[in-house]
Image (tube, grey):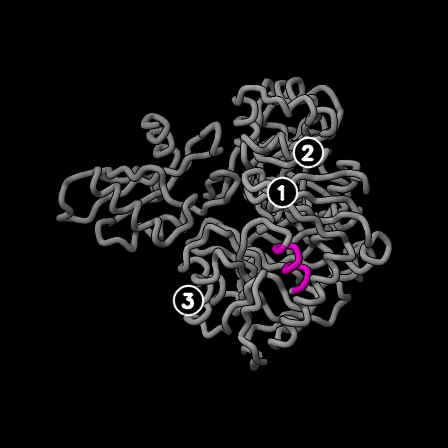
C-alpha cells in the first residue's frame, strides 16, 4: 500500500515547520495547579532543543535502529525527547508514567533498549532499572546528568531499514492484550503521520487552532490525535500534566483553546461540576471536543448545550495508530452511545464471522479494518502478529459490531481487555500477577461499567488449600501484592474470594457469569 508519508520522518516535518513557521508557538506547558510554570516553545525553539538532545544521544552512541525508552509524564520535554530520539534514526519506546519498576524493567528488557530518557521525578527508578538491565545510566531531561562517555552498541534484534525513510519504525508502544505480558506495537513514521493527517482532515484543523492536551502523550490517542496533527498543521499544542476538573476551563479560557480531547469519564466529571466563571469564556473559543469511550445521547446533548461545543467520538486501536472511525462533526441526527461514527477517510472496514467471511449486511461480527496507519507488527512476536494482521493489511480488532446506514456500532469486546480510565488492562496480566501469590490457586479478572472510570476492575480468586480465613485481610494482602508489580490503574478495586470459578462445558472460565456477579456486588 502506497502511503502519502512514506518518504517523510518526524524530523523532516519539524525541520519544515522550523523553516517555514519558526516564530509560531508550538508547545506550551500549562499546569493549572502551578501557574508560574508556564513556558512556550516556538517551532524554531523546539527544533533547537531537539538538536541539542540529539547530539547528546549520538555522543552516547544511540543510532539508527536502537530502541530508546522514554519514561515521563506530559510535558514539552516529552515531545522534545521523542523528536530527538527519532531524529537519530532510533525508535522511541514511550512507557506509561505510572509503571512500577518491574513493569518498566520488562519493557527495557523486551525492547532490548539501548538507553532510557526520563525526568527528575523518575530518575531514581530509571537508574535502578537501567542498572539491572545493563543499560547505561539514563539521560535525565532538565539536568546535565549523562553517563559522560560513548558506549558500545548493545546486541539487539535488528529491524528492516532499507525501505523509504517513512516506512522505518518510529515508535514502539506497549499495549496490554489478552496474554500475560504487554506486546510492543511497531508504528512507522508514515503510519503516525498518516494518523495525524486523518485527524487533521476530519476535524478541519488549521494553523490558528490551539489544542489542549491532558491525555497522556505516551498513548496513541494524544500522540496521533493531537501531537501529530499540530506538527503537520503548524498549530499550537497546549500541554497539561493531567486532567484537572478545577483547572480545565481556566486553561481553555486563558489560551483561547479551540480543540479539546478527553475520554468519557472526565467529560462526565465536567458535566457534574457546578458552572464556573470560566465556562462562558471557554465556550466562546472552543469549537470541538474530541472524545473516546462512549457517551449516551443525553450526555452528548448536555455537553453541546452547556459548553457550546460540538463533540466527535473516535474509535481505534494502538495497532491502527488510533484510527478507524469517527463521528462526523456538525452532522445530525446524533446517534446513541453504541455508534462509533463512520469509517475514516482512506480506511476500509468489514464485519466478519468466526470463519473470516463477511457477515450479511446489518449482521454482527468482528470489526476488521485496513488503512494507512496500521502497525508493522508486534516486536519479536510473529505468531501474535499473524493472529491479528493478514498479508493484505487487514487488522482484526477483537471488537464486535455491526454497520447500519453507514454508521458503525460497537457492541462488545471479543478480547479480554478491561478499559480503566482510558487505559487498556489485559485481564491476563492481572491474573498472572495474582497467581504469583501463594494464597491464590485460581483467579479471573473482569470489568464492570463505571460512569467515571469507564470500567472498574474486579478479581475473583480461589484461595489455595489451607489458606487461613479472613477475606478482608486477604483482599488487602493481594491488592498490596498487585500494587508492587502493577501500575495503579491495573490494581483491582476489589478482590473477591469464591469457592470455585464458573466454567463452561469444556472447562473455560465463564467470565460472563463473573461479570454478572461483579455487577451485583458493585
**Residue 76 picture location, percent across and down:** 64, 52
Q: Which residue is mark 2?
A: 254
Q: Is residue 510 visible?
A: no
**Label 3, label 2: how far apart the Cα atoms are:** 41 Å
- Earlier in the chain: of badge 3 and badge 2, it is 3
**Label 1, label 2: how far apart the Cα atoms are:** 10 Å
CB-based contact (under 8 Å), mark 3 and mark 2: no
Circle 1 SS class: loop
CB-based contact (under 8 Å), mark 1 and mark 2: yes
Q: Is residue 384 visible?
A: yes
Q: 449 and 207: which one is in front?
A: 207
| In the image: residue 522, left or right of residue 193 | left
Inspect the magenta stretch and tell me whether residue 514 lies in it.
Answer: no
Q: Which residue is mark 3?
A: 128
Q: Residue at x 59, y 80 (%)?
A: 150
> In the image, which residues are magenta?
77-84
Q: Residue at x 71, y 30 (%)?
A: 288
Q: 442 and 92: which one is in front?
A: 92
User: Relative to residue 405, is residue 466 depicted above or below?
Assistant: below
The dot on residue 30 is 1
Amino acid at each position: 500500500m502506497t502511503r502519502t508519508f512514506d518518504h517523510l520522518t518526524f524530523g523532516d516535518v519539524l525541520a519544515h515547520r522550523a523553516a517555514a513557521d519558526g516564530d509560531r508557538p508550538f508547545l506550551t506547558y500549562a499546569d493549572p495547579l502551578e501557574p508560574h510554570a508556564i513556558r512556550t516553545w516556538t517551532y524554531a525553539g523546539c527544533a533547537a532543543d531537539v538538536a541539542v538532545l540529539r547530539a547528546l544521544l549520538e555522543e552516547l552512541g544511540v543510532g539508527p535502529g536502537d530502541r530508546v525508552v522514554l519514561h515521563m509524564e506530559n510535558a514539552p520535554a516529552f515531545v522534545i525527547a521523542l523528536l530527538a530520539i527519532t531524529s537519530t534514526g532510533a525508535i522511541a519506546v514511550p512507557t506509561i508514567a505510572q509503571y512500577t519498576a518491574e513493569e518498566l524493567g520488562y519493557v527495557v528488557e523486551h525492547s532490548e533498549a539501548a538507553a532510557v530518557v526520563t525526568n527528575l521525578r523518575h530518575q531514581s527508578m530509571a537508574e535502578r532499572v537501567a542498572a539491572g538491565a545493563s543499560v547505561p545510566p539514563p539521560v535525565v531531561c532538565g539536568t546535565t546528568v549523562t553517563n559522560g562517555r560513548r558506549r558500545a552498541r548493545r546486541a539487539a534484534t535488528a529491524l528492516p531499514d532499507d525501505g523509504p525513510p517513512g516506512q522505518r519504525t518510529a515508535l514502539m508502544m506497549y499495549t496490554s492484550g489478552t496474554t500475560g505480558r504487554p506486546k510492543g506495537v511497531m508504528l512507522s513514521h508514515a503510519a503516525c503521520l498518516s494518523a495525524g493527517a486523518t485527524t487533521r482532515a476530519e476535524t478541519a484543523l488549521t494553523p490558528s487552532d490551539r489544542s489542549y492536551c491532558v491525555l497522556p502523550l505516551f498513548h496513541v490517542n494524544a500522540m496521533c490525535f493531537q501531537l501529530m496533527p499540530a506538527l503537520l498543521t503548524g498549530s499550537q499544542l497546549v500541554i497539561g500534566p493531567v486532567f484537572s476538573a478545577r483547572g480545565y476551563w481556566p486553561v481553555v479560557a486563558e489560551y483561547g483553546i479551540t480543540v479539546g480531547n478527553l475520554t468519557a469519564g472526565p467529560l462526565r466529571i465536567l458535566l457534574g461540576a457546578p458552572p464556573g466563571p470560566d465556562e462562558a469564556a471557554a465556550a466562546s473559543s472552543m469549537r470541538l471536543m474530541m472524545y473516546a469511550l462512549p457517551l449516551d445521547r443525553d450526555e452528548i446533548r448536555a455537553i453541546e448545550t452547556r459548553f457550546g461545543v460540538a463533540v466527535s467520538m473516535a474509535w481505534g486501536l494502538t495497532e491502527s495508530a488510533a484510527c478507524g472511525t469517527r463521528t462526523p462533526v456538525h452532522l445530525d441526527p446524533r446517534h446513541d452511545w453504541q455508534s462509533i461514527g463512520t469509517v475514516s477517510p482512506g480506511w476500509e472496514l468489514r464485519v466478519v464471522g468466526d470463519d473470516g467471511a463477511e457477515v450479511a449486511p446489518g449482521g454482527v461480527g468482528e470489526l476488521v479494518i485496513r488503512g494507512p496507519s496500521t502497525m508493522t507488527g508486534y516486536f519479536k512476536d510473529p505468531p501474535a502478529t499473524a493472529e491479528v494482521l493478514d498479508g493484505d493489511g487487514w487488522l482484526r480488532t477483537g471488537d464486535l459490531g455491526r454497520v447500519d446506514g453507514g454508521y458503525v456500532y460497537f457492541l462488545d469486546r471479543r478480547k479480554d481487555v478491561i478499559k480503566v480510565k482510558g487505559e487498556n488492562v489485559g485481564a491476563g496480566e492481572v491474573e498472572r500477577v495474582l497467581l504469583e501469590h501463594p494464597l491464590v490457586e485460581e483467579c479471573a479478572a473482569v470489568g464492570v461499567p463505571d460512569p467515571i472510570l469507564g470500567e472498574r476492575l474486579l478479581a475473583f480468586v480461589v484461595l489455595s488449600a489451607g489458606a487461613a480465613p479472613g477475606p478482608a485481610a486477604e483482599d488487602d494482602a493481594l491488592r498490596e501484592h498487585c500494587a508492587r508489580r502493577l501500575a495503579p490503574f491495573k490494581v483491582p478495586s476489589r478482590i473477591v474470594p469464591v469457592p470455585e470459578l464458573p466454567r463452561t462445558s469444556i472447562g473455560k472460565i465463564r467470565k460472563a457469569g463473573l461479570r454478572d456477579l461483579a455487577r451485583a456486588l458493585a
